[in-house]
Amino acid sequence: MRAGTRRSLWIAAGLALLVALAGCTGGGAPYESAPSAEEVEAGHEEALREAGSFTYNQSVSVNGSLFDVTSDTTAAVDLDGDAYLVETRTGDSGVAVYAPGGERPYVRTQSGNTIRYERGENGSVPNASRFVAPPLSELSDSFEFAANGTAQVDGTRTYVYEANLSTLNESAVGPVGEALAEAEATDATVRVYLRSDGLVKRVRYAFVVDGFGEPTRLSLTLTYEDVGSTTVDEPSWLSEAESATS
């Protein structure tokens, strides 16, 4: 397998959620006509900022005979208090970032039994804006979405927008579209679940590619939960981080 193909597949896994939000079309709430990527992004961010807090969950997996990897991320974000706690785990490795009230964040990195602490610098670690307003516009040509009814998500009625491999624009310059074309995707389904006020409640996608010489499944599930009721608690490792970085 070419190194470029492997790199493209990982780009697809990391960025596919952006594609899912990038080109939703179709009638019905929360948009009366086809929204642009900017409209979806703005509506989502407005709903989150009005709520003041939220919990973001994301699970990304690559499953095949050669690869079987899952990465899980949870972020508790308090926009009003300018605080967040982000935790990502992949196998026996993990990274956690805690930013209390706009201060320089504490970073905990674990690899096996080795744990390290440091104070993050601006721009060197994830921040709340990553989860509030992901960049969408540059990927908006990768898929064309259509409205596909409604569904309940966490007890909330949402409007479903869906795309599949037949709507992939292979001439798109977006990295996801290019990666899927290069990796010889045989299946692709993306669904976005929007609340009536524009909040993105859930994104689900699954891509099946032959880039590894046999079918390999790349999937992602992303949810926004406890919107307006999330609190950012101090992590159990904070005292250790303070001692290690003082």
Image (spheres, rainbow, N blue to C red):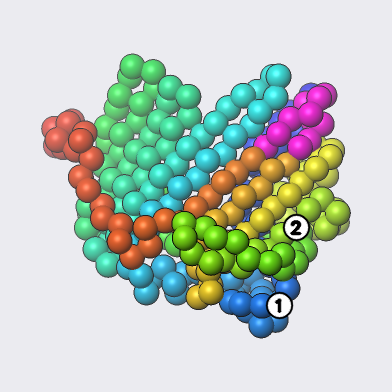
* Count of labels in the image: 2
**Tag 2: amino acid:** Ala
Q: Residue visible at 53% across and 74% down?
A: 196
Horizontal and vertical percent position of residue 156: 49, 64
User: Which residue sits furthest top?
Assistant: 113
Q: Is 62 colored magenta in this rendering?
A: no
Q: Quadrant of residue 108?
A: top left
Is residue 217 in view? yes
Q: Residue visible at 31% across and 52% down?
A: 84
Is 152 situated above or below 56? below
Q: Is 214 colored magenta in this rendering?
A: yes
> What is the magenta range?
208-218
Is 166 situated above or below 37? above
Task: Kindly state the secondary structure of the residue where label 2 is placed.
Answer: strand
Disc 1 marks which residue?
27
Q: Residue visible at 80% across and 43% down?
A: 187
